Amino acid sequence: MRLSGVLFFILFISLSSSAQKTTIQGSAPGAERKIIRITAPGDLITFWEKPLASSRVDSTGHFSLSMNLEQTINVSISIDFHKTEMFLEPGKTYDFRIAPMRYDEYTEVNPFIQSQNLTIEPAKSDSLELNTLVDTFNSIYSGFLMEHFNGLYRDHKKVLLDTFRIQLNQHFGSVKNSYFLDYASYKMASLEQLTQYYNQAQLAKKYFTERPILYNNPEYMDFFNSFFTRYLTVTSNTIRKVDLNALLRGADPYKSIMKAMMADTLLKNEQLRELVMLKGAMDLYNMPNYSQVELLGVIDAVKERTKFPGNRIVAEDMISLLTKLKPGTLAPEFTLPDRTQKLLSLKTLRGKPVVLCFWTTYCEGCLSEMDLIKPLYDKYQDQIDFVSVSADKYFSKMLYFINLKNDYVWTFVNIGDQSDVLKDYDVRTYPLFVLIDKAGKIYKYPAEPPSNGLEADLQKLLEQ
């Protein structure tokens, strides 16, 4: 069974008395001694991924991970860059087998491109288990949508939706799982929007203004994201007439925008209004007519002033996402083995600027650029640390290669199975150069390679 769904994460506090231990165990043939990770987005607007648990698959291919959860969440389970998703409910134990895979066939490719879907098979079948319910519902839903898309979208045949509700009630009428019922309800909301079953005001009243915000339910948040996309500048007849730039430049943009949005009758609920403002700020962030600094100021104001914990999580994740790898932000930390297998932490290099070069032994462009690092190292070694980060799966492969190069005398480290480093630096092509200042903050990402102006940037960095 391949589980589907959108990744999501809900704030959990392991010390809280309401948190319950949830365990994931099973086998993953072919993944012996690899790391299995459980992650989930901090929120379902930014999808900013956060770790929940990790463990190493043992020599027999078995694994076990535990975490404390307060609410049902939808997680990503990954081995290397291969992943699947499933729902976890507090206090339950999940036992399944990950279908065999020859993971090491993918050691010399771009992991972002070549990642595969993991397929999981539960140890025992249970038709009322949440993952089974969702999978069954999604299969029925997808079949209905494919068969009747033109009738729903083009002809707005509302009777099709009424008939489908009867069909779903026959399948799921006895289900009591509240999380699933909310999931199905908001999945149907998308069809009601597609068929224009209700107008915008009616949809908002039915699904938003008179119901709680379900931060941890992917279908609620998927419908929210669809309904409120470009809402501030296009959809809302009230707000789109407001000069948002003037409000952004005012003395208290947060207060001014929230007040202007209150004129929209669909946004009388303060918690919803604030979340829509956050969504709008993110939509505007990469539009040319708006200041990113001013928009970040509004998001930061929500983080500091909001009365709603769910909105605070969204604001914090937005800041992390929108400023990731931007100049002045802390460079993602890592600890990796050098050529002598001594662990090197990036934070130990603070006090001097750092040049990071992500490379692999099979990348010809990497090798030509690294040959050009040597004269830069000779010139700046007392002022700058040079660190070449090998993305080769095997330490021995990196070591064999650099031992053949007598002039590769600067620092080399190997990622091995710590694939999170590649995610943290968003390494999608090789080579990738990054400049970090002496305080451990990003100076330039991506930086120019040695063949195209790296030295000029090094001189500017040293002049700071």
Image (cartoon, helix red, strand yellow):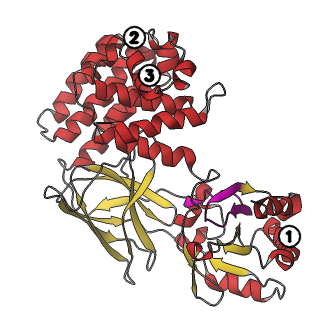
Could you say where residue 199 lies in the image, as x and y percent from the top left?
35, 10
3 vs 2, front mark: 3
Q: Is residue 74 above or below residue 461?
A: above
Residue that mark 3 sits on: 257
Mark 1 Cα-neighbour bin, 10 Å: few <14, some 14–19, many ≥20:
few
Number of on-image labels:
3
Q: Is residue 121 visible?
A: yes
The secondary structure type at the circle numbered 1 is helix
Q: Residue at x 23, y 30 (%)?
A: 212
Position of 337 compared to 230: left or right? right
Mark 2 Cα-neighbour bin, 10 Å: few <14, some 14–19, many ≥20:
some
Residue 250 part of the magenta segment: no
Give the mark nearest the N terminus, 1 or 3.
3
Q: Residue at x 22, y 39 (%)?
A: 180
Residue type at tag 2: His
Image quarter of residue 415 = bottom right
Position of 290 compared to 76: left or right? right
Q: Is residue 194 above or below residue 64?
A: above
Q: Which residues are magenta?
A: 424-445
Residue type at tag 3: Ile
Residue 443 part of the magenta segment: yes
The secondary structure type at the circle numbered 3 is helix
Q: Residue at x 49, y 26 (%)?
A: 251
Give the mark nearest the N terminus, 3 or 2.
2
2 vs 1, front mark: 1
| Mark 2–mark 1 distance (CA, rounded to whole Å) | 60 Å
Residue type at tag 1: Ser
Q: Quadrant of the C terminus?
A: bottom right
- Indicate which disc residue 156 carries: 2
